Amino acid sequence: MPVTHRVVPLLSLVAVGALTLSACSDPAAESGALPENPSVIILSGDGMGSQQRTAIQYHSYGLDERQPMDALPFAGMLDTIPGDPEYAVSDSAAGATAWAIGQKVPNGTTGLGPDGDSVPTLLDMAKDRGMSTGLVNDHDVTNATLAAFGAPVADRDLKVEIAEGYLERGVDVLFGGGEKYWYPEGDAGRIPDVGEDDVSEGTSNLVERAEELGYGYAYDRDTFDALAGPRALALVQDSAKRRSTEIEGYDYQNDPHYVAPEKLVAKALDILGQNDKGFFLVIESDDLDSDGHEHDAQNMMLAGESVNAMVQVITEYQKEHPDVLLIVTADHETGGMAIENVLDDGEPEPNSDQIADDPVPYWAETPENMPLPGGGVPKRSGPFTIKGTDRQFKVDWTTPEHTGTMVPVTAAGPLAERFTGVHHNTHVYDVVTELFGN
């Protein structure tokens, strides 16, 4: 029998009058005094809007059992508009920076203030409190979302500079892909290069530098299992689940360099949890964003499985560590995704897909993720079965880019009730700093 969870439906939040973009701060909602040494986990499904969360729910959990990311006890909505004089739609850098510093900034701004000035991030504040810090990704650990917290830079594409910044700031746990930025050109690193995108493009051996600074280093499942902290760097197979659909003959389960995202999170909790002053951890599924850009709902479902598995690991951890606040949200939505009927009055409902951002992995005689003649459904868009039923749905897309829709936020732990309602995305910063007592 599925476990019954207390869920606040997102639509009901609007019905009860939470229509203003302001913080809910009713002291009566608090269950008690704030913990002296809280921990914070922000889990971002990059590009994961309401439609993506719904599709993952239907495909993997059906209609009755609530998926872990939506089974958290408090739910609300966050806007995603950047602090940009020109644009109404955010990129990942501006979206994550709003969480990290509590200010809306122009697109492309990664962890810096609106004028490009250096300001403390939530990760900096955590370090000042004596907390341990960590960054985890299922893709490139030096991407914009994590950099906004751990290595603010003027340009999100300065990947090597971001990796150097993590080490300079002393981020305790760094897990994910992107090995190529940590090794100099000509040094293949520890993971075999299969395609051009795997080739190293760093300027120095940052892995050696990390080891000199006291980091344990892992590059496959065996070395990862041996990590003990208090500092750890794991550069494992990048976007392994996606590679299984892009590289003929590749099976991520048989790749010794693949470490499941939920195992990355479990190890991060083991290491960071050794600090009795608490920890601050930011986790991202960047593959969800890539799947939206590429109009690939099949891989989006796989990434969603990983997000839910990570949430399960965290909620189990919370049972023994109730001072942990978990926030699950997104920086923006990607693809303008819609869930549609496969059939309408016995006739196919045509797809109106826009051209995908990056069709490269899916070129075929019949395109798998591109518009088909007559509105046919591309292979990557469905149909998908709603688990436990005979019903099916398909996915359609309106853009290869980001959209400006609000995104869901769900939360559990101390001050989680603050996320009930509709808020600016800077509200994440407001709640965390309140928990820190700032």
Image (spheres, rainbow, N blue to C red):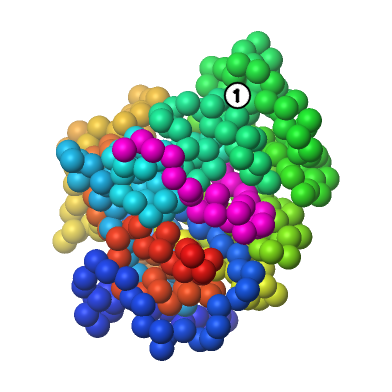
Q: Nearer the viewer, residue 202 or 213?
A: 213
Name the one closer to the observer, 216 or 384.
216
Q: Is residue 110 above or below residue 348?
A: above
Q: Is residue 132 magenta?
A: yes
Can you say which quadrant of the picture contains the N terminus? bottom right
Does 177 sit left or right of 226 as displayed?
A: left
At a point 41% along the width and 29% down the height, the residue shown is: 155
Residue sitting at the far bottom: 28
- Quarter location, residue 387: bottom left
**247 shown above or below 48:** above
Tag count:
1
Whether residue 117 appears in magenta in the rendering, the answer is: yes
Query: For the magenta stretch, what is the residue range?
Result: 115-139
Which element type, helix, strand or loop, lies under badge 1? helix
Residue plotted at (36% across, 36% down): 116
**Left or right: 84 as drawn, with respect to 275:** left
Write the residue at 62% across / 52% down: 127
Instruction: From the top left corner, tell me how far across and down residue 39 is, in percent.
Output: 60, 65
Q: x and y percent of residue 228 in the render? A: 81, 49
Q: Can residue 355 be seen in this snapshot?
A: yes
> Which residue is label 1 attached to?
180
